[in-house]
Amino acid sequence: MKSKQPSKGFVVVASKKPAFYYSALNLIESLLDYMPDARVTLFTEDRFKDERAEELCEHVLPCGDHLREKMYGILNTPYDHTFYIDADCEIQHEDISKVFDFLPGNDMVFVKLMDDPVSMKCFVEKDFKGPDGDETLQLCGGVCLYDMTNPLVKDFMQDWNDIFRKQEDEGWVPEGFPKSICRWDQFTLWWLTHKVDKYKDIKIGEFDDNYRWNWFTNFRWHQDGPNKGKHRLVNDHPIVVHYSNAMNKEAVH
């Protein structure tokens, strides 16, 4: 008997502000421009939902208004293999259709936070001190490819959701760590991959060409030399997922 192929799809989450909803629709449209047969699920609040979302998506599912409702959407994906993308992104290349090729041999795949000293200035907080000395966030949670057929991955996503809510809603800070770092879900990601023995054997991969899968608008430009006027960290391959933190997140429409 032929084995059943895992379902593959994309998850986007838009909560809290109307601007995230409109940005999510733009993201989904850009995805479908390059991959018309993509299966997409949008998690959003009922107060934002309209007919445009229903036309674009396979599923439009309800979520709450938490600051990081993204983890709820990641956890509740209807797909076996899922590529989560932050709502304030845009797809810019047809290689998005190859994203699931990174999953074989890995349980999860992330973009790695590089150590380029100029480009990394766009991060508000990446390095921090813990009880064992200097630490640094290593994985970016803006996109995430993962296999929910693995029960350990499902547990990981449940903990990512639960522990961040504990950080945000209850002010939980592990002993010896600065309170400021606990405002980020990337810290929760760091905590799970570095401090929780249960996940020490989980296979975490990194995307080839790294930042083309989550390019930041405000990465710095080269100011001189043969690369003057070009973005730092760009290689010979075009950007696939472009993130813009310049979005007006307070916009009503």
Image: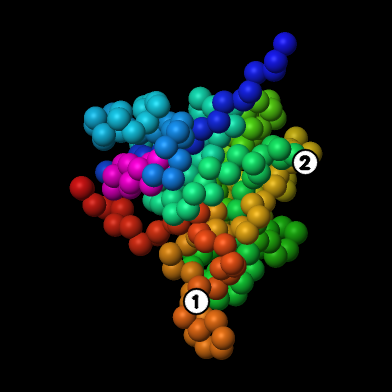
Give the class, few, some or many, for how many residues have Cα within 10 Å of label 1's Cα (few <14, many ≥20).
Answer: few
Location of residue 211 in the rendering, given as x and y in whole percent from the top left corner? 57, 60
Give the quadrant of the N terminus: top right
- State the residue at coordinates (68%, 61%): 135
> Does the magenta-highlighted stretch encompass residue 21?
yes
* For residue 11, above or below residue 91: above
Instruction: Indicate left or right for 70 with 192 as reference.
Output: left
Instruction: Indicate left or right for 43 with 122 as reference.
Output: left
Q: Amino acid at mark 1?
A: Lys
Instruction: Indicate left or right for 200 with 206 as reference.
Output: right
> Does the magenta-highlighted stretch encompass residue 163?
no
Read off the magenta span.
19-32
Location of residue 168 in the rendering, given as x and y in whole percent from the top left corner? 48, 44
Residue with the mark numbered 1: 230
Residue with the mark numbered 2: 200
* For residue 105, above or below residue 124: above
- State the residue at coordinates (70%, 15%): 2
Quarter occupied by residue 144: top right
Tell me the mark number nearer the camera, choosing from 2 and 1.
1
Whether the residues at callouts 2 and 1 have beta carbons within 8 Å, the answer is: no
Asked which secondary structure carries label 2, the reply is loop
The secondary structure that most of the magenta stretch takes on is: helix
Residues 154 and 242: in front is 242
- State the residue at coordinates (64%, 52%): 207
Location of residue 188 in the rendering, given as x and y in whole percent from the top left corner? 59, 46
